[in-house]
Amino acid sequence: MSLREKLQNGKFVVTAEIGPAKGVDIHEFNENAELLKGRVDAVNCTDQQSAVMRLGSLVACHLLNQKGVEPVFQMTCRDRNRIALQSDLLSAYVMGVENVLCLTGDYVTLGDHPDAKPVFDLDSVSLLHAAQQLEQGKDLAGKELKGTPKFFLGACVTPGADPVEPQLIKMERKVKAGAQFFQTQAIYEPKTFEAFMKEAKKFGVPVLVGIVVLRSAAMAKFMNKNVAGIHVPDELIDEMDKAENKLQKGVEIAARLINEMKGMCQGTHIMAIGLESKVPAILDAAKL
Amino acid sequence: MIISELKPLPEILGYLDGDKKIFIVGCKGCAEVCQTGDEPQVLEMKQKLGQEGKTVTGYCVVDFLCDKALVKTRLFPHEDEIDAADSLLVMTCGIGVQATAAVVNKLVHPAANTINVGGSRGEWRGSERCRECGDCVLDLTGGICPLTACTKWLINGPCGGAKNGKCEVEPDVRDCGWHLIYERLKKLGRLDKMQTMPIVKNYAKMQPPKELRSTIMWALEQQETKV
């Protein structure tokens, strides 16, 4: 069963993400893919994550397909205009990639090529719209396609944003533009997520709660200071601080958060950021 | 000089849908030269709106709508007429619309599209406010331009990166444009506007008209002598 079918059948799904290599050595990528195979329902390949130049997301998705791991193709609007984005969507479909996560993308100055010219011809909402147009047999210019693709379109939302209302307004626009599932930014406060889901439920679209695995108290403090929409509460920072085995504690906290929030949503999306090898342990601890 | 052209009347009426009483603001600066916002055009608009069943509570033609201090002074005597209106229709470039929005607590609607700034920005002394996109959306954003106020030029709402109302790219100097838009529309009770933005932007309209391309100063002179 595909990710789409599982979500349609009401199965609680698990997705995880892998960042393609900075270079052409794909050993680690392959190892991570093997670790996740059979344990998660789909694997996201990030698209030049944090505006850092890497191996392409589409090629990484193709590699996953070859291994029998269902990919989620992350697409950002930072580096390609509407012509290139639509072309890559067609390419994805031809390569058997059905799931596409449509994102705006981080700004270039936050990455490793701050001198680059950013594109942002489309944004997350208009990219969803473009993909939906392709599914209807036409491109954004209204020209007919020879053969039409079929996607399972996803988008991102930040439940911890303050204020959250503009996020919900944009979420509704994403649903209208074709989003069929959401993966959220990391969240550490089940109460905040519960309040968000109370509002988001009305859109009738499955939501996969985002989990970022903590590595240390310092990492949590860094995210609180620098990453918008992420707030790690003091109790969790304390817990990390006191733990002797930080990695084990990070795994334990991730599993606990999944258990606390799984009743509120339709799945979970684990962003291990370098700790992909710990994902099976998190799933074991969460009994998933 | 900033070149603007009036939007088609049906588009303007679409913006005014639901608003019965309108106050019109015109401009004697560039809009006078372009014949988009001088007194004769303002009076013509007043008449057209009357024919469409709208009440014009008053009007004011400001010397330079891009000068915020001047706008404030000139609009002050019209306070009651502005209070009585549901919203304001501003007949000038994108900068003038934003300058007006900055001094009144009412929704402002642009009556014109800004095609080209021709190398100058009127009397506006602040940072860049108008990208002359040729398809003004200030009506839908509470008079704050998402193309200039948002680092990523987002037209569909905020990214997830703003923190404490500041843009993630330059948090020390830049507010999140969409946070400003959201706060203003919320204050005006018009958050519904955020749902009606066009999903895809036509960037071809950012090209100035063919006769103005590459020969802007020359073309401006021609335009000025025509009037």
Image (cartoon, rainbow, N blue to C red):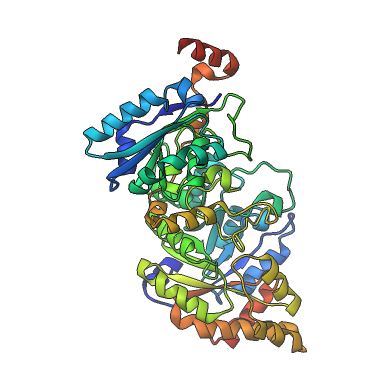
**Callout count:** 0
- Give residue A244's quadrant in the image: bottom right
- In the image, B82 versus A164, the foreground residue is B82
Q: Residue furthest right?
A: A244
Q: Quarter of the image containing the N terminus of chain A? A: bottom left
Q: Residue at x 41, y 45 (%)?
A: B79
Left or right of residue A236: residue A101: left
- In the image, B217 versus A279, the foreground residue is B217
Instruction: Measuring from the top left, give residue B7's x and y in whole percent.
Output: 38, 31
Vertical comparison of A154 with A269: above or below: above
Vertical comparison of B87 with B64: above or below: below
Vertical comparison of A96 with B205: above or below: below
- Give residue A32's quadrant in the image: bottom right
Q: Residue at x 38, y 76 (%)?
A: A10
Q: Residue at x 41, y 69 (%)?
A: A200
Left or right of residue B217: residue B59: left
Residue A130 visible in the shown view: no
Instruction: Measuring from the top left, give residue A157's x and y in whole percent.
Output: 51, 64
Instruction: Measuring from the top left, give residue B164's x and y in whole percent.
Output: 61, 63
- In the image, B162 versus A269, the foreground residue is B162
Left or right of residue A11: residue A230: right
- In the image, A31 versus B206, the foreground residue is B206
Instruction: Measuring from the top left, give residue A135's x and y in whole percent.
Output: 38, 49
Residue A22 visible in the shown view: yes
Vertical comparison of A224 with A62: above or below: below
